[in-house]
Amino acid sequence: MATEGYRKFKKNIPHWVTEKVLDWNRIHGVDTVQGLNRRVKNGSFPELIEAEEVRYQDEVAKAAALIAEHLDRIRIVIVAGPSSSGKTTTTTKISEKLQKLGYRFKLLNLDNYFWDLELHPKDEFGDYDFETPQALDLKLINQHLCELLEGKTVQSPRYNFKTGLREEETVPFNLEENEILLLDCLHGLYQEMTDSIQDSKKFRLYIETLSMMRGVNNRWIRWTDIRLLRRMVRDSWHRSYSPVATIGHWHYVRKSEMKHIVPFITKVDYVFNGALSYELPIHKKYMFKYVIEAMDKFRDIPKKKDAYRRAERVFNLLNSIEVCENDSIVPKDSLLREFIGGSSYEYKI
């Protein structure tokens, strides 16, 4: 069902998609860290935020319109992508846009289908690998998807990320006539996640932080580092998980992404840019001290060399960024609020 333009993938993201992002950054003077810093220092940072939010909303509208074109056969819309790429907010906003177009959607957050944390194996540092698709109850997900499309009511589980346990209370969930199911899931592209549903009934949207910005060393800023910073903030505020622990855990995230997400990008119907060109100065305000702490913690642990190198790389990045101390200029409905808090949306995380 993918449109012709999205059939010509190379390794993962099509070249013309990243070129479009880079063109936008150049026009707004933020294709380099130096350019971003100038906007912070010269007082034009609020205008950058406003322009980026308009760009993001326009992309939401475009994705929603593309989905609407195929609603004669679509029963499930899947918003997938790596950790902290912005799936939840983007799914919510696409749903809002489709509702304004007269379509009815209902969101099922598959994060509620996690197994209890105690059922996951630990490594020698006491860390859990909960990044694989098998961390979710795939059998129950597929059972519920089939039943929902048959018009039945299911009892959706509720997962508490602070306790690492499913709660005893479940939530009745059903689809009304002519309602389309929206799925927000890290591994939504993984075939076994929705294996019980025919591919022709699915629309797959992939979201990634396509930052397309060069650092002071003239190298591209890694998309994964943007997402790491987002998750460090979110984990510390919403999931009782320290930012330093998030850095130490990130190798699990990357391993799972490369195995269970990246290989399936070529099958999607739309690639969505979830990066915000203005977010690094705000991340520095919250996370810089924790990156330094992570370097100190992992420096002399041989089996944590990967975590140390990652912390060092992010330190060098943030050290080159002008900080923004006043994040009140970020709109309450911004995707960034999913991570830094203060959103007008309620996130069940």
Image (cartoon, rainbow, N blue to C red):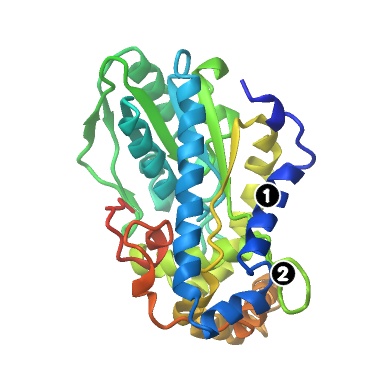
* Residue 241 place in picture, x, y as percent: 41, 68
Residue name at image x 35 percent, y 42 percent: 112
User: Which residue, given by chain and number where applicable, does mark 2 sit on?
Assistant: 214
Residue name at image x 59 percent, y 34 percent: 190
Q: Nearer the viewer, residue 92 or 26?
A: 26
- Quarter location, residue 37: bottom right
**Callout 1, which amino acid?**
Lys
Q: Is residue 156 above or below residue 130?
A: above
**Callout 2, which amino acid?**
Arg
In the rendered structure, are the residues bearing label 1 and label 2 in contact, judged by CB atoms less than 8 Å apart? no
Q: Is residue 49 above or below residue 1?
A: below
Looking at the image, residue 47 sits to the left or right of residue 163; the answer is right
Locate the N terminus and report the quarter of the image it occupies: top right
Residue 136 visible in the picture: no
Chain-order first, disc 1 or disc 2: 1
Locate the C terminus and report the quarter of the image it occupies: bottom left
Q: How many marks?
A: 2
Residue name at image x 79 percent, y 39 percent: 10
Q: Nearer the viewer, residue 327 or 263?
A: 327
In the drawing, what numbered circle is on residue 223? Answer: none
- Quarter location, residue 110: top left
Residue name at image x 37 percent, y 72 percent: 329
* Residue 78 place in picture, x, y as percent: 48, 33
Q: Nearer the viewer, residue 187 or 11?
A: 11
Secondary structure found at label 1: helix
* Residue 280 place in picture, x, y as percent: 54, 72
For label 2, the crowd category at 10 Å Cα-Cα, with few meaning under 14, some 14 to 19 and many 20 or more, is some
